[in-house]
Amino acid sequence: MLIIGEKLNGAIKSVAEAIKNRDGEFIRALASKQLDQRADYLDICSGTPNGDADILKWMIELIQKDHPDVRFSLDSPNPDTILECIPLCKNPGVINSVSLEGSKIEKIFPVIKDNKGWKVIALLLDETGMPETVEKRMQNFYGIMAKVKEYGIDEDRIYFDPLVFTVGTSPDSFLNFIGASKKIKEEYPNAHIVSGLSNISYGLPYRKAVNHAFLIGAMMFGMDSAIMDPLNRDLLGGVYAAEALLGEDEYCIEYLSAYRDDLFGVQK
Ligand code: THG
């Protein structure tokens, strides 16, 4: 399971404040904490529609000083921002994200094609907006896959995000998500599935319970990456436990090591 730490996001109030004040200490601490909790990638998102390239560049340079091995998930709606940030990253990361909307694929895929270490998150989205059904998600999947083949990119470098609505108003949200996941994995066993997951609980109280149920359920149907809060120790424990149940952690070596390192915060 690939864990993408979500905390460096300007949509979070305290992070927006730190970005505004260029509070490097705050950002560095949030990066270190997530890496300590074994985040594989750090998602960085400015949360501002304009000028986000400068903010992302600032974060990249700041965090790389402390952690030269860090890998970033470049989270920007603006493909030009992503293209500006790629050369600054010492290690290959994740592009978050492309979709069939606008010119993102045409701008990103040619650069990624020969930049082999980079992975790409592809939202199953087109210019008509959020997909309501499994069929619409699959239509978008085939559209993106056609581009993946056209550019000669290996399908195992793409993390497909089937997208979720809140279950508060869309009772089929999770079912549609796993419906698409199952079909994708049947047709392309090497393709990956990712989710930002917390949309599933939007507007509900005690969101953690819903997010947790979603994470475990989705993992059972092939989701192998999540943009999530690794500082949420119950959620992180769930990831390690579910991996063991899925036979992906022989003798629970990873689970036990995470426990021993007190990632779950329960060591006696
Ligand atoms: N798909 C893709 N990218 C995405 C999303 C997605 N990027 C943005 C978003 N959705 C995922 N990122 C966040 C970041 C922060 C929060 C939610 C989603 C958030 N965090 C709470 C906080 O830190 O205050 C804590 C949440 C918790 O305790 O679990 O709200 O869907 N491709």
Image (tube, grey):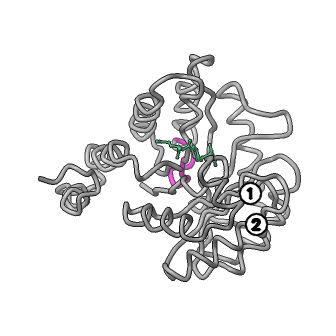
Question: Who's the residue at 54% across and 47% down the image?
Answer: 193
Asked if residue 67 is among those painted magenta in the image, a careful observer would answer: no
Question: With respect to residue 133, does 86 lie above or below?
Answer: below
Question: Who's the residue at 34% across and 47% down the image?
Answer: 233
Residue furthest to the left: 268
Say which mark, if any, is on residue 56: none
Pick whichever of labels 1 and 2 is earlier in the sequence.
Answer: 1
Q: Residues within 10 Å of mark 1 (few under 14, many from 20)?
A: many
Residue that mark 1 sits on: 76
Residue that mark 2 sits on: 82
The quadrant in which the N terminus is found is bottom left
The local secondary structure at tag 1 comes to: loop
Give the residue type at disc 2.
Ile
Left or right: 79, with 207 as reference point:
right
Quadrant of the image occupied by residue 82: bottom right
Do the CB atoms of the residues marked 1 and 2 lie less than 8 Å apart? yes
